[in-house]
Image (tube, helix red, strand yellow):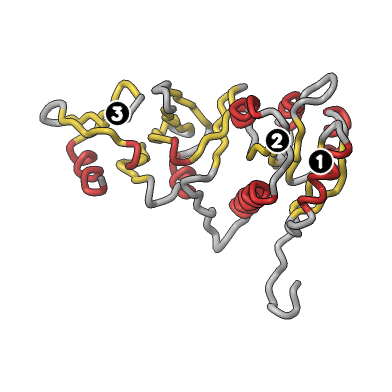
């Protein structure tokens, strides 16, 4: 408790550093000293020792090197699956070509060596947002921002995407179907065991609109709304086929906010 303000001091995020090179761990530790929100609880030099620390320390975040002897950093991720809650993972590596794979492998963020203070500050900000979003605040779930990353997982498949890259979310009972389209026009449809109401409570209101009980739409991702016949409209997104079919009432609601 902070006696001066009478407010609770937010808990520090407990971190472990994983890198086979001691100088690299030292460099990152020095950079992290500028961020009192982070507490380094231990360090590891490879995946097996990192796993042992994860099990004993239960860190909130792992700063993880990718290229290490015998096993690279990606090998640690499947071993984190049984944990609840799972620690956030921030990859730290000298090789830019790993960036896309890092995000597809469920990394919260990606840093290149040598780590710059400015880039690290952005990562810490993202970590704090993630941590706060898991805490209750007046009974409400903290809303995500357009630039925030969210984990999409279906079976063995997982990836991290920015909120603004989600075109629409459709209810499928206790599941939801997430519709995505990338810059190359390649579409993905990810089925997740999460209700539509859960998504609605987290999504930024300035971006997502609830068209019906079963559909959330990213209004910035809509490329067209075309009347098919007297009772049906086609909701179209760039790079996504086929279109989503809407009733006259649903299309009227959506047209008011487009």
Q: Position of residue 27 (x, y in %)?
A: 81, 44
Say if mark 1 contacts mark 2, CB within 8 Å.
no
Residue found at x 48% / y 32%:
175
Q: Nearer the viewer, mark 3 or mark 2?
A: 2
Mark 1 lies on residue: 17
- On the question of residue 28 being in view, the answer is yes
The secondary element bearing badge 2 is classed as: strand
Q: Earlier in the sequence, mark 3 or mark 2?
A: 2
Residue 35: quarter of image: bottom right
Determine which of the numbered discs, if any, sits on residue 244 in the image: 3
> So how many labels did they put on this image?
3
Q: CA distance from mark 1 to mark 3?
A: 46 Å
Q: Which of 193 and 127 lies nearest the eye of the viewer? A: 127
Classify residue 208 as left or right of residue 137.
left
Q: Which residue is mark 2?
A: 91
User: Callout 3 environment at 10 Å: few (<14), some (14 to 19), or many (20+)?
Assistant: some
């Amino acid at each position: 408790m902070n006696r001066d303000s009478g407010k609770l001091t937010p808990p520090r995020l407990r971190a472990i550093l994983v890198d086979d090179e001691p100088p690299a761990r030292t460099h990152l530790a020095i950079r992290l000293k500028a961020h009192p929100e982070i507490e380094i609880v231990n360090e590891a030099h490879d995946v097996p020792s990192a796993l042992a620390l994860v099990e004993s320390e239960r860190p909130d975040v792992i700063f993880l090197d990718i290229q290490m002897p015998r096993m690279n950093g990606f090998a640690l991720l499947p071993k984190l699956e049984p944990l609840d809650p799972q620690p956030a993972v921030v990859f730290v590596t000298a090789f830019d070509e790993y960036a896309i794979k890092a995000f597809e492998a469920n990394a919260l963020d990606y840093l290149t060596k040598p780590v710059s203070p400015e880039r690290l500050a952005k990562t810490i900000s993202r970590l704090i947002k993630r941590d706060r979003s898991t805490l209750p605040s007046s009974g409400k779930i903290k809303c995500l921002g357009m630039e925030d990353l969210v984990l999409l997982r279906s079976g063995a498949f997982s990836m991290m995407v920015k909120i603004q890259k989600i075109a629409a979310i459709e209810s499928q009972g206790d599941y939801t179907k997430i519709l995505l389209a990338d810059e190359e026009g390649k579409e993905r449809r990810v089925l997740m065991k999460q209700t539509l109401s859960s998504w609605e409570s987290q999504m930024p209101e300035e971006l997502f609109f609830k068209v019906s009980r079963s559909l959330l739409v990213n209004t910035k991702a809509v490329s067209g709304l075309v009347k098919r016949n007297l009772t049906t409209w086609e909701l179209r997104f760039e790079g996504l086929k086929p279109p989503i079919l809407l009733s006259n009432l649903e299309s009227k609601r959506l047209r008011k906010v487009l």
